[in-house]
Image (cartoon, rainbow, N blue to C red):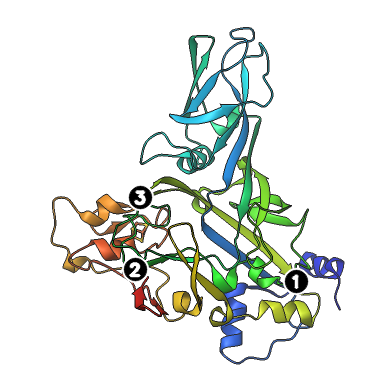
Amino acid sequence: MKTIEEINEKIARKEATILTAAELKSMVRDGQKVTADEVDVVTTATFGVMSGTMAVMMLPVAGKCSFEKADAIWLNGVPAQPGPCPNERLGVVDLVINGTSHADDRYGGGHLFRDLVKGKEIDIFVEAHGRTYENRVTLDDIDFARIITTRLAFKNYHAIINPTATTISSIFSVTGLTGPFTETTVSGCGEINPLQNDPSHRIIGVGTRVLLNGAHGYIMGKGTRASPDKPNISAFADMKGMDPHMMGGMKTSHGPECLTSLAVPIPVLDEEILSGLKILDHDVPLPVSDVNGRTAHSKVNYGHIWDDTDKVIRIDKDRCLNHPDCPAMRTCPTEAISERFIIDRDLCINCGTCTLQCPAGVFRARLGSIEIDEGTIPI
Ligand code: SF4
């Protein structure tokens, strides 16, 4: 058995063998024999819609004594909750703002967090005792700005289906989930998910150092709705170290949602930890749930999602019909298509929506399908 101290010394000497989870899985798929002596750290990660994301900040609004305490506050039009500290007569406002709060159907907390991390100026609008106060700030003007997650990195997150004939607006669908059993949506990283790779929770727990949206952060413990079957975790990190490419917002048919990422290094201390890291997608259970109440419907596995499917959208621009109102551009949930057939890869999350919207097939990807009693359901 190795110790974390020994591994850290090897890292400092630049002698450690560090693999991404994808690299290790690829070696396992190829039939290579890998032992705990040969690898020191495996990096795991997940990225996607994480509704349980919020920010806690203290914002400079006006001079001292200009107002007693804030009654309401908006940042770029996104409503926040002043407090808990009233900061009486100090002209600053402590606040909590949810990643899922939104200004309109295109811009929400997730977009705001990304704009702040990108260094953009944001508008502050405060109501206090019948008067209003405004300011414009960047992240550099904000002393305290942290992202806190109430839950993220759900292990074995569901595939969602709609058994009814009515299209249902949902955070699980960009355009509304059709039915009965005509399509499914999935948000889950399967074999590279951090919790999937630490099945006995030997490594990931309170105080574990992680990267949250690319910034150094810490695990606070289990998250809300965590269960032994489907654990998740809560974490925090300072917004000032975050990377805008690893976070953001997206439109869904139920309003804007927040995109968050988490990366966790797993030290390979012994063969037991390595065997947890060797799990492959086809061995990771994927529960299928009804969008109405999320009741269990059936169970498949993550191999349906990630084996032999495309992880990145391909573009065949010669097919473009120059449609005056490009449906892919209009529908893209991250507004990554700025011109016909041009995708901003920093914004694109490879969700696949454009492949279903473009009638000419400019955007292409094999998205896979799941097999349930009702038939083959496309993802
Ligand atoms: S896959 Fe297509 S629809 Fe989805 S974010 Fe990327 S460009 Fe937009």
Residue located 52% across and 23% down the image: 73
Type of amino acid under label 1: Ser
Amino acid type, label 3:
Ser
Q: Residue at x 44, y 37 (%)?
A: 102
Rendered location of residue 370, percent (x, y)? 41, 77
Foreground disc of the pair 2, 1: 2
- Element at label 3: loop
Of marks 2 and 1, which one's residue comes earlier in the chain? 2
Whether residue 222 is visible, yes or no, is yes
Question: In the displayed structure, would residue 284 be above or below residue 102?
Answer: below
Q: Which residue is mark 3?
A: 253
Question: Spatial distance from mark 2 to mark 1, Cα to Cα?
Answer: 34 Å
Residue at point 64%, 70% (across, down): 196
**Compared to 22, does 336 lie above or below?**
above
Q: Secondary structure at mark 2?
A: loop
CA separation, marks 3 and 1? 37 Å
Give the quarter the ligand 1 occupies. Answer: bottom left
| Quadrant in which the C terminus appears | bottom left
Q: Look at mark 1 in the image and give the residue it sits on.
A: 200
Tell which circle, 3 or 1, labels the residue nearer the N-terminal end.
1
Q: Which mark is residue 69?
A: none
The image shows residue 256 at horizontal and vertical percentages of 42, 45
How packed mark 3 is, by other alpha carbons closer than 10 Å (few <14, some 14-19, many 20 or more), is some
Image quadrant occupied by the N terminus: bottom right
Residue matched to label 2:
183
* Dot 2 beta carbon under 8 Å from ligand 1: no
Q: Is residue 338 visible?
A: no
Q: Is residue 202 left or right of residue 152?
A: right
Whole-Å distance between the Cαs marked 3 and 2? 15 Å
- Give the percent coordinates (x, y) of residue 337: 30, 53
* 192 to 75, vertically: above or below: below
